[in-house]
Image: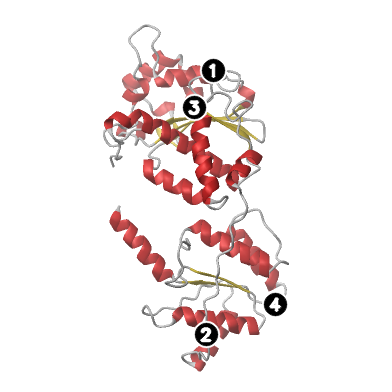
Amino acid sequence: MTENIKNTAITAAGYIYQNRQGLRVLCDWLDAPSRYAMVKFECDVDADAPMGLDDIVVERSDGLQDLKQVKFTPNPDAHPLSWDWLLEKSGKTERSRSMLKKWYDAYRSLDPARIGEISLLTNRRPDAEIEVCLSNGKIDFSKVVGPRRAALIAELGDENDCKKFLDQLQITHSDKGYETLEHEIDARLRAHGTPEGIAVLKTLALNWATQKDSPPPSGWITLPELRAILQATPPAPLPEDFAVPKGYEVPDAVFHREFVEEVMRSAGKAIVLTGPPGRGKSTYLSALCDTFAEKDIPTVRHHYFLSTTERGRDRVHSHVVEESIRSQIKRFHPNVPSTSGSLRALLEAAASHYKSLDKPFVLILDGLDHVWRIFLCEAKTH
């Protein structure tokens, strides 16, 4: 798919794309704070990273260093990840080097004891010749044959040098497009900051990539600074109370009793309540929650759609749903052991806790038909 980029703005788009990849790394950091110690965009100090592997530099908590190069093309179909592109020299003098040679020279200048991951990140897609050489995200030198093998050896050195470098170079290809990447970053940052803080971060990130020693004093981004910019207080929990009209009665008392009993004995199973739109499924599920409360059955829930009058609330994207459920467990089930892992791990911890008390732990998800309609509409517009 061709990106909607003006021909005169391709270079600028490449820098913005690189900056968005840097923001993506910051999202990874916010999601797992112990992962990194510092991050730098567009490194320009030899002591921090060698030229050629300096687009995004990550100092990991274990003392190792990750070096990322980002390459963008507005037309991945016409400009694939190929040997011609990797080995093309940027000039016509004897000192001219290919991109692969620049990365190799930078790699050779590194302290081996500090090398974490060296990676190429690109939205280009591999052509057939490259694709057959890829194995687990790296080029397998033994699969490079014929003239390409000779060209690699001529460019980088002997076979052993080629193999060692290619074994180190992680290649992430066919990555998200220009606009899709921005949508991902915006969605992920909303879990960590206010809209104003996110807007400030995106502006400052451009400064960090273009201005020396930015952020001061030495250009390294730290986690406390990142959180301060985002004003990273947890967003207000979503309201999850779907009002039950006064005097409401369940449609069928026998069905309701059997449904409650089925839920009570359905450990580890999913029960699906279906019906046409507007038939009262959400109202019934809210009444069901009241029944569970009366029986002292622990419950959390999420409504993908609450009412037509609610505006400005994102109830669909996964990080919003996860945060809502996490918040409910923390507020209403404080005795559940906290976990630092995934939402699944937290739900399993809640289920195990209440199983020890001989109770089920119930998660209610309502409005999946709304989710289906929303994503179906989005698919039709892309």
What residue do we see at 69% from left, 59% from top? Answer: 338
The amino acid sitting under disc 1 is Arg
Lower sequence index among marks 2 and 1: 1
Q: Quadrant of residue 147?
A: top left
Q: Which mark is residue 358?
A: 4
Residue identified by numbered label 2: 259
Give the SS element for disc 2. Answer: helix
Query: How far across and how far down the image is residue 74, in percent?
Result: 31, 35
Q: Residues within 10 Å of mark 2 (few under 14, many from 20)?
A: some
Q: CA distance from mark 3 to mark 4?
A: 59 Å
Q: Residues within 10 Å of mark 1 (few under 14, many from 20)?
A: few
The amino acid sitting under disc 4 is Asp
Residue identified by numbered label 1: 108
Lower sequence index among marks 3 and 2: 3
Lower sequence index among marks 4 and 2: 2
Q: CA distance from mark 3 to mark 1?
A: 26 Å
Q: Are marks 3 and 2 in contact (CB under 8 Å)?
A: no
Q: CA distance from mark 1 to mark 4?
A: 61 Å
Lower sequence index among marks 3 and 4: 3
